[in-house]
Image (tube, rainbow, N blue to C red):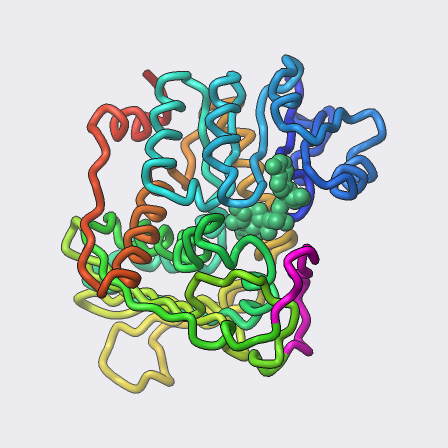
Amino acid sequence: MKDLRIGVIGAWGRGQLALCAHKPGEGSRLVAGADVKPEALEKFKEKVGEDVFVSDDYRELLKRDDIDAVFITSPDFLHEEQAVAALEAGKAVYLEKPMAITIEGCDRLLETAYRSGSKLYLGHNMRHFPVVLKMKEVIDSGIIGDIQTAWCRHFVAYGGDAYFKDWHSEQRYSTGLLLQKGAHDIDVMHWLCGGYTQRVIGMGKLSVYDKCERRDENNPGDASWSDSNWPPESQTGLSPIIDVEDNNMIMMQLDNGVQMSYAQCHYTPDSERNYTFIGTRGRVENIGDYGNCEVHVWTQRGPRATPDIIYKLKPLEGSHGGSDPSIVTTFIDFVKNGVKTNTSPVAARNSVAAGVLGHESMRNGNVPKDIPELPQYLLDYFASGQQK
Ligand SMILES: NC(=O)c1ccc[n+]([C@@H]2O[C@H](COP(=O)([O-])OP(=O)(O)OC[C@H]3O[C@@H](n4cnc5c(N)ncnc54)[C@H](O)[C@@H]3O)[C@@H](O)[C@H]2O)c1
């Protein structure tokens, strides 16, 4: 079978994910990269080969007819423009989360995929995390009864390093970190609870990083991580403009009656996404989210310290707990063979919608916000695996 020929827009940073698809002769290969940074294109060439096509303009990459599919791994605020252009150019698209930074942007992408018939795939790699799949298996088995509520506490120790020194810190580029980071968690909770948010209420605040030393606006900023950046108030080199919150909390009412909450803090000493799903006959919770981690299940009354079942998960090879190689393989299989996927463009849109309106609520007196519904023809099209 011929290799799927792939271009990468945003060739470094998260773009390194696409290297998992570079398997010449085995079904897929990288043939092009676009990035605005020359050093990113240099590194891309070092990994992929000197003969690979590179450009500082993604439109040049999209013009090529020797490219079947693209990975779009550029910053969030570019997703809508670049993915619409790629779909219009007839390329299958792997688009990183969050799908876009507005609900209108997501809806434009769904509409363009429908109209063009080009395949759209959303890179929600947490749907490939072993710990998430194990909790889904527990819930789907029925052992904890019918899910009624779900909570996620999201501790982000690297928040000051990664999100307050570059584009992430500005609403015009990210909308906010509830959306930027939380798109993953809202999506996981929607998936495991079997519904989508109808109404959201938010509360949040910029509480620590507004007090830290800033960088000059001509200095591009260094968003590399270091454990020595502690305590959070000692961070230096922060963005000149910070208008996103470092503490975010939302409550969500789902269309199937389930209620959820999500809390995210960017100045904790430790890092973890800690979920719990509570049903009518028990509760499941993860302890650790990848690598060596556990899933605990309680099905009888008794102390928290002695769950009824403990699953011990072993580390898998590959970045993000082994989810990155797995999601790339699924994308290639989806494009080439139309296989059913864990992820869904409609679900990605609905996680963005809850994030955007959660931000809107927290910035406007904590008023409830209702998620606009998608038209039935789009729901049908994506439910059918993008077959007209
Ligand atoms: N799923 C995950 O686990 C995961 C992890 C990290 C990042 N992400 C997502 O990946 C995306 C990129 O994040 P990042 O941290 O790598 O960002 P980044 O700022 O490092 O940018 C990624 C690459 O895009 C390039 N780029 C910037 N502007 C461009 C343009 N106009 N055209 C082409 N390339 C351009 C940058 O030079 C860089 O090489 C974000 O949307 C983020 O949410 C997802």
**Residue at (39%, 30%) from the top-left corner?**
109
- Asked if residue 218 is among those painted magenta in the image, a careful observer would answer yes
Q: Residue at the top extreme?
A: 65
**Residue at (19%, 61%) from the top-left corner?**
367
Where is the C terminus found, in terms of image quarters? top left
Q: Is residue 355 left or right of residue 122?
A: left
**Residue at (50%, 69%) from the top-left corner?**
156
Q: Is residue 345 left or right of residue 1?
A: left
Q: Is there any visible trace of residue 323 in the rendered image?
A: no
82 vs 45, nearest the viewer: 82
**Count of numbered labels shown in the rendering:** 0
The percent position of residue 187, horizontal first and vertical second, equals 36, 51
Residue range corresponding to the magenta coloring: 214-229
Using the image, determine if residue 81 lies above or below residue 228: above
359 vs 363, nearest the viewer: 363
The percent position of residue 117, horizontal first and vertical second, equals 41, 17
Quadrant in which residue 385 is drawn: top left
The percent position of residue 295, horizontal first and vertical second, equals 42, 68
Quadrant in which residue 276 is drawn: bottom left
What secondary structure prevails in the magenta region? Answer: loop
- Asked if residue 138 is among those painted magenta in the image, a careful observer would answer no
